[in-house]
Image (spheres, rainbow, N blue to C red):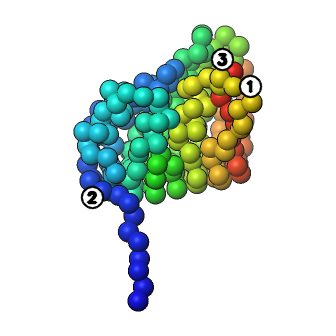
Amino acid sequence: WMIVAAPAYAASSFTLDNVTLDGGGTVYRAARIEITDSTLSREEMQALLAGSDHGPAPQRLARVGAARIAIPELVTDQKAGEMTQSVTYRDVVLEGIVAGRIGRASASGATFALNGPQTGAMSGRTGAVALSGVDLPALSHMLVEGRTSPDEAARIVVASGGIADFDVDLPSGGHGHIARIDLREAGGRALAV
């Protein structure tokens, strides 16, 4: 006899339209999110994304589980002081999400624009992005929350992955190209508050 364990997902699949998430300095927008075999109901996921599901972002994200989440276009807008940044990811697919940790993440590519007094206006694009072992609760803590202990250990937020064909157009008229960026055990810790 062979016993095969089924994934711990509830049989809840649904689509969310016109989603906006304020991530504390970064706003995420998606016209459509397709969620397959979610551990949360549609209503629970909407509350989590809307921020009406109270609690720190890392704790909320740790509740997310799904076999697959597909986002045809994900736009992020960030403002820090006088610096603005906008990134548009295409064909985002997240698979094997358990307790907010993503087994595999991919995007067919991205475009970005950055503008600030120190950088000037820059723009660019990437080819395919493929990541594995993405720890969303740890990443959220690092980006949104401040480090309250000087001894807080660094945490790995991406186990491995790569970005193909990174191109940037510089304000001076210059252009840069990196054929491939490989990541291994990428991480860090939150900034001190």
The residue lying toward the viewer, choosing from 107 and 172, is 107
**167 to the left or right of 136:** right
Task: Give the numbered dot on residue 72.
Answer: none
- Residue at mark 3 to residue at mark 1: CA–CA distance: 10 Å
Mark 3 in CB contact with mark 1 (< 8 angstroms): no
Q: Residues within 10 Å of mark 3 (few under 14, many from 20)?
A: few
Residue 47 point in image, percent of width and height:
30, 33
Rendered residue at 46%/53% (across/down): 98
On the rendered image, what quadrant is the N terminus found in?
A: bottom left
Q: The disc labelled 2 sits on which kind of residue?
A: Ala
Residue annotated with mark 2: 11
Residue 110 point in image, percent of width and height:
53, 40
Residue 34 point in image, percent of width and height:
32, 48
Q: The disc labelled 1 sits on which kind of residue?
A: Pro
Task: Give the numbered dot on residue 150.
Answer: 1
Q: Residues within 10 Å of mark 2 (few under 14, many from 20)?
A: few
Q: Secondary structure at mark 3?
A: loop
Q: Is residue 44 visible?
A: yes
Rendered residue at 65%/53% (across/down): 160
Q: Tell which tag, 1 or 2, sits nearer the viewer.
A: 1
Residue 172 higher or lower than 180, as above or below: above
Rendered residue at 47%/46% (across/down): 100
Residue 120 point in image, percent of width and height:
66, 16
Q: The disc labelled 3 sits on which kind of residue?
A: Val
Q: Residues within 10 Å of mark 1 (few under 14, many from 20)?
A: few
Task: Give the numbered dot on residue 193.
Answer: 3
Residue 96 higher or lower than 60, as above or below: below
